[in-house]
Image: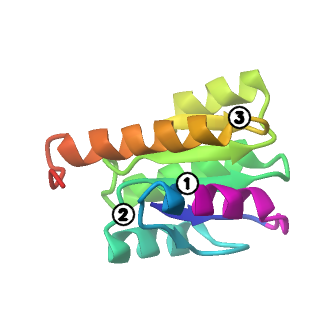
């Protein structure tokens, strides 16, 4: 699992809470930190051979930032890599994110156990899908 903060958002407490919770659940987690570009996120994802990329956006720019990440994912031939998004997200925007190709959306206040369980489920589906490595 790779966790990153794209854009100019400088608040990363939620991303760190999720990263630590996933780690405590037995996942290997790479945290890239603040102000990551889509290119940097996907380069790290490819280098580390991650099963899921998670971005946290609290600035309100989650739709354009996710769209940029999804577009770059396609450009790099990584369409099978699931992307999840967390942050201050309205139900309408959550639907827009899913339409863009985001695997799951975690609005602020989603119980951490739900986040962990759903992300692990997405990772398991990712590696058992055709082209996955069946870890």
- The residue tagged with tag 3: helix, strand or loop? loop
Q: Is residue 117 above or below residue 45?
A: above
Residue at (65%, 72%) from the top-left corner? Answer: 36
Q: Quadrant of residue 4?
A: bottom right
Judged left or right of residue 58, residue 52 is left
| SS label for mark 1 | strand
Please name the residue shown 74% across and 22% down the image.
Answer: 92
Q: Position of residue 13 (x, y in %)?
A: 79, 63
Q: Nearer the viewer, mark 1 or mark 3?
A: 3
Where residue 75 appears, as percent x and y from the top left, is 39, 58
Out of 90 and 118, give the one closest to the viewer.
118
Q: According to the image, what is the colour scheme of the structure?
A: rainbow
Range of residues picked out in magenta: 8-21
- What residue is drawn where x is 67% and y is 75%? 33
With 68 as the anchor, is 74 left or right in this view?
A: left
Q: Distance from label 2 to label 3 (Cα)?
A: 23 Å
* Above or below, comparing residue 9 to residue 48 in the picture: above
Which residue corresponds to mark 3? Answer: 110
Quadrant, the N terminus: bottom left
Q: Nearer the viewer, residue 108 or 21?
A: 21
Q: Main secondary structure of the magenta part?
A: helix
User: Between disc 1 and disc 3, whose residue precedes?
Assistant: 1
Circle number at residue 50? 2
Give the camera-side residue of 31 and 10: 31
């Amino acid at each position: 699992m790779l966790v990153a903060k794209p854009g100019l958002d400088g608040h990363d407490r939620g991303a760190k809470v999720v990263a630590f919770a996933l780690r405590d659940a037995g996942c290997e987690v790479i945290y890239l930190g603040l102000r990551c570009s889509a290119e940097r996120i996907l380069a790290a994802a490819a280098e580390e051979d991650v099963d899921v990329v998670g971005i946290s956006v609290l600035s309100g720019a989650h739709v354009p930032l996710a769209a940029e990440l999804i577009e770059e994912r396609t450009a790099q031939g990584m369409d099978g890599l699931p992307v999840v998004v967390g942050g201050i997200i309205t139900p309408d925007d959550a639907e827009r994110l899913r339409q863009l190709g985001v695997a799951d959306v975690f609005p602020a206040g989603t119980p951490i156990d739900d986040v962990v369980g759903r992300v692990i489920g997405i990772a398991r589906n990712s590696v058992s899908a055709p082209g996955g490595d069946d870890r």
